[in-house]
Amino acid sequence: MELTQTTVNNWLAQIDPGAGYIHLPGDLDPQDLTDLLEGRYGAPRTLVLDGFTDPTVDESRGAALLIPFADRAVTIRAWAYGDQWVGAGTARDGEGAVRPVLAVARRKVPEPLAVAPDEGGDVDWTERLRRITGWAQTSRRPDVDWAEVESRLGTGLPSDYKRMVETFGNGAFDGYLDLNQEPWTDLRGDGLLIWAGTEHENLYCWRTDGADPDRWPVVVRSFDGEDVPFDCQTAEFVCRVLVDPHHPFTMACYFDTHWFMNYGESD
């Protein structure tokens, strides 16, 4: 059968978001569904493979998706999307036949943590970002050779940015704010390095003044070419963008629950 985003949207609308699933047409290739969902939600996590459940699966990794299947799941992959888990794969029906399935379950994510305007000091902003997004996966890029990257760029890089890349890897906050895996140098002539961007063509940069990268301020080069400075570091800036509805580049107006869409390989 021909699989489209509209078809999948219609299927998802049929599922009880509390914790439910539907069997899909038997002529559907489950891999086609996985590929389509991966293009929408990023890289999935494998919960069940060939009938064996990953022993590390818990509430923070999509276990709620497996409840309605009991021991009938064959292969299930999961995506975190806002306050929901979306799962797809195969499971045995009541007669024992293996059929494609699509599932949805509620995802418990901590309430977005408010950020006071004057908050700073000793706050661990990367850890705050993990909590805001409900990120429970292991570090995605713990072995980045930053010495090689910094040598090639000819400059050191902010430590909180490096920790963000190591922790989250390749992807986007709320599927919107793309985290560059190393800075782009396109605006170097303007004294800027680009560490992130959005589909609205805003570029998130540092102004590389001074010898200490951890003191570089964030600058947003907007789609119309205006530079908007912020007196904060990288991870703090992302936290504020996610949860502060009054931030000039807020995402809190669009998403009540925040997540990180990983573009990397499936677990």
Image (cartoon, helix red, strand yellow):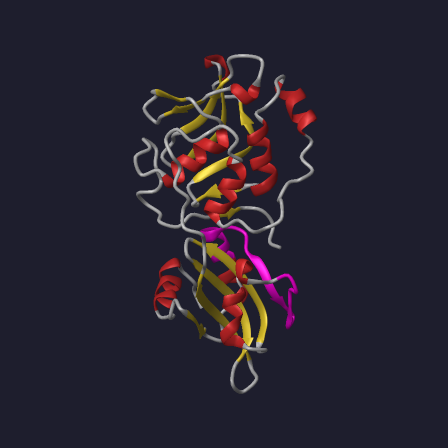
* Quarter occupied by the C terminus: bottom right
Picture residue at 52% right of the left edge, 81% below the top: 93
Residue 129 is covered by the magenta coloring: no
Q: Nearer the viewer, residue 136 or 122?
A: 122
| x and y percentages locating residue 235 in the rendered image | 49, 33
Residue 43 is covered by the magenta coloring: yes
| x and y percentages locating residue 230 in the rendered image | 40, 23
Picture residue at 34% right of the left edge, 36% below the top: 250
Residue 92 placement: quadrant:
bottom right
Picture residue at 53% right of the left edge, 37% below the top: 126
Picture residue at 66% right of the left edge, 65% below the top: 55
* Quarter occupied by the N terminus: bottom left
Above or below: residue 14 compared with residue 161: below
| Residue 29 in sight | no
Q: Residue furthest bottom?
A: 95
| x and y percentages locating residue 110 in the rendered image | 44, 52
Above or below: residue 73 compared with residue 194: below
Above or below: residue 44 compared with residue 159: below
Above or below: residue 172 compared with residue 180: below
Q: Nearer the viewer, residue 4 or 258?
A: 258
- Look at the image and give the residue range highlighted in magenta: 35-56
| Residue 218 in sight | yes
Left or right of 78 in this view: 118:
left
Q: How many marks?
A: 0
| x and y percentages locating residue 231 in the rendered image | 42, 22
